[in-house]
Image (cartoon, coloured by chain):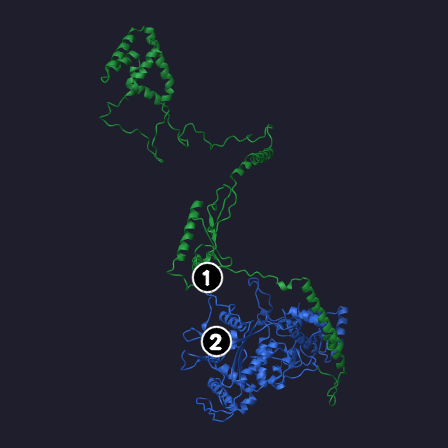
Amino acid sequence: MSASNCLRCCLLRPSVVGRAGATAATAKASAAATARLRQGMPLAAAAAASFSTTANRGANQKPKPGTKAAERNAPPSIRQGKLFTIKKKKKNDSGARVKSPLPGERKAFRKRILLSNTNALPVPGLTDLGAESMLDPSNVCKVLSLPDDVVDQLRADEAFKTTQCWSMFRKPSILIRTETVDLITRMHAAAKTNKTLRLVLTGDRVTGKSLMLLQAITQAHLNDWLVVNIPDAQELTTACTEYAPILDTEPIQYMQQNYVLKLIQAIKKSNEKLLLKLTTVFSHAGLPQNIPIKSPLMQLANSAKEAEGAWAVFQAMWQEMTAQGHGRPPMLLSLDGLTHIMRISDYRTPAFNPIHSHDLALVRLFTDHLSGATSLPNGGAVIAATNRNNAPRNPSMELALAQREAEQLGGGKDVPQPQPYLKGYDERVEAVLRNVQVIKLQGLSKLEARALMEYWAASGVLRITVDEKSVTEKWALGGSGVVGEMERASLLTMRF
Amino acid sequence: MTSAANSLRLCLRTSNQITSRLRTVQRRQVPLARRALSTSQARWVAKEKGKDDEDSEPPELKYYSSFNDPGEALRNRLKDETLSEDDRATITGMLEEWQLLPQQKKGDAERLKRDINNEMSDLRRIINPKRDAFWNDSDEKDTDLITDEFGEDDFEEDDMLSMSHGKLEEHREAREYARITVWEMPLLSQFAKSFQPPAKEDCLRFRYTTYMGELHPADRKVVVEFCPKDVPGLSEAQQLKLKKLAGPRYNPEKDIVKMSCERFEHQAQNKRYLGDTVSKMIETAKDPTDMFEDIPLDTRHHTFKVKLKYPKEWYINTKRREELEALRKQSLLLDEQRRATGGLIDGVSIIKKNLLAAVEPEPVMELRGGPRSGKMRR
């Protein structure tokens, strides 16, 4: 049906009806046209009658035979058959242009950590943590909030995880558990006697291992310790960051300069005050910049501007931070995801042999300190937390931790023994974990659970009366107080 | 001795070859060696030239010709040089008697002989095998031939239906077993033996299978079980070695070695083999040259079943009931105390209170500067 025969087009198309200028005029004209139609006037006459100065062209006229336009309009010949045509995808019609995210934006969104929510109610009577609060057993079963400057430091350390529910509350706060007091007391005792606490936090899924590590880091920051935190050991061993062999090492070790640069920046940010205060005591050769003796450590840290040379700077910083007898503070070396560094990494040697994780220099630094081969001369703690959800199979680590745990309980016969015919035991892993302390996290006690639920209710995210009945209910739903499961049962569900 | 039959009998008796011949004469077939596929006609084997004259007539035919009358036969007999003197005298006497007989009697003897020959001709006839017969047997009825089936299975109203026959058979069977139950089963008690519990030395437990007299491939199977601890005279280390020797036949959960054999045809053979194997194992376990100390006991073949038991502390009894009651009372009391002091936190009321406090007049948007145009632009 051509345009001129289509009544609707005839009535509405301004080119046919005529350019009246204003919409009102168009309406009038169309009304006139309809009136004419009713009287049975010919359409061509109606088209000619409008106020038009332009020639009537296009749709009304037949194209001359032989021209391209004629070919286009001609029906397909019978011989041609049916043609398959792919329709062009229509672009967004709504008019709003959708911008695809820039490189890295998606990851940033995924990794984004919200530590405050203004919709949540401020909890009355919530106090900040002090330097000694986590040592005090009377603070057990209390929820205390993190001081703002420590929050910044923890953020720099990447101690907060995306899976934790910080974004539901007004202010990041933590529950003091009996295990917290235990851990912090051990840390303090070690620091007092210039010894190194070597400890592994283990436990089932979502029992709060990473959060316990965060509490240890918080305590270190509150007491002006130097903190070096490896937030996710997975990044070191799953071959997602660049690596290069270190010359003159036997057996050959590998450095991960990009990661180390990131780590230096994190250390710089989280220990800013200390690094400004402390000054270098050694002269270092082979650094990107010449750092004279007695210049602040911050200057040394700042000299790592590119991945190239980052490993040398890190080594120099490590040497400075652990210098003995220069009034250096105790140090906390912590790592989350121990399972990932207790296995053969995904990296390969040039001969395509797999590289053991302990041959990666940064990992080796950590494992040496964890095993006690090297100690922190100014005292401090080396704490590692295992991970359960995304953990590779690791029989040696499981066995070693179970053995240490049994030994701590003083069981002579109950210490589990390796299965003689099981494959996959790793001697290097056993050697590292032969002499560490283990804290196994389990469910919360009912009192702890109650304190936590009261904090949730006071923040306005738990719409129930927190009494013994409801606490017991959630405690049981959470598998005898597994804190993550309790959270899942009460906060992350739509049913209350 | 004057009858013709008598003289015939005499002739037959004296002529050994003929009697034996008569006895053995039966209907027989001439075996024809045929090839499966042959276009040439079957022929007799060609006779040798030298023998032709002698063997032109088979030797028995001589006696046939002498049978024309007994006198002739006797005369023929006398020609034989190997005859003893007594026989010769007897035959000569008989010949004289024959010659003295009247002609009519002689004719009788001839008739008798003819009759006998007639009777026996059927036996002497050579039967050629039927060419179509399957077993080369002329008497065979060809079962492959389809019989005239019409009316074969028709019921002639003279019998019960087959279902009735079946029912009857059932009854017979039941009655047979009933008879056995009543008459024969009680006799079994004669064979009953009192149970003798195995002695302490009998540490092997054998298991056999019977299918009540039926033939079955598994009825030869014998299984032996024993606990290494029960084997007399084994030290701890030897017991461990025995377990290691048993390999996957050792069940660590039950501490039992279980072996089976069905390699041989008879149960007894299999049992013997098992007994030999066990004694060999025990012997090896006792051998102190290599105690397998460097090899740990392998239990990978066995999956240990963890049997979860309901904890004893959780059993509901009066004591536990009281405990629970006290706990509940205590927690209720705690809640009541908190409620009284205002320490009980109620999430719903807190949210309500805060929502009420938060209700403030909405800030009105004010225009800054003069209106730029009369209408809002889209």
How far across and how far down the image is residue B290, in percent? 38, 61
Q: Type of residue at label 1? A: Asp
Vertical comparison of B92 with B33: above or below: above
Q: Share a chain, discs 2 and 1?
A: no
Disc 2 is attached to a residue of which chain?
A: A
Residue A432: mark: 2
How far across and how far down the image is residue B2, in percent? 33, 8
Mark 1 closeness class: few <14, some 14–19, many ≥20 residues within 10 Å = some
How far across and how far down the image is residue A196, in percent? 51, 82
| Element type at mark 2 | helix
Residue A271: mark: none
Vertical comparison of A129 with A345: above or below: below
Within the image, what quadrant is residue B44 found in?
Answer: top left
Disc 1 is attached to a residue of which chain?
A: B
Mark 2 and mark 1: Cα distance apart in space: 28 Å
Total numbered labels placed on residues in the image: 2
Would residue A471 be visible to someone looking at this image?
yes
Quarter of the image where the N terminus of chain A is located: bottom right
- Find chain B in the image and tell me its colour: green
Vertical comparison of A481 with A287: above or below: above
- Find chain A in the image and tell me its colour: blue
Q: Type of residue at label 2? A: Val
Quarter of the image where the C terminus of chain A is located: bottom right
State yes or no: discs 2 and 1 in contact (Cβ < 8 Å).
no
**A166 lies left or right of A423:** right
How far across and how far down the image is residue B277, in percent? 41, 52
Q: Which of these two is toward me, B170 or A72?
A: B170
Residue named by callout 1: B298
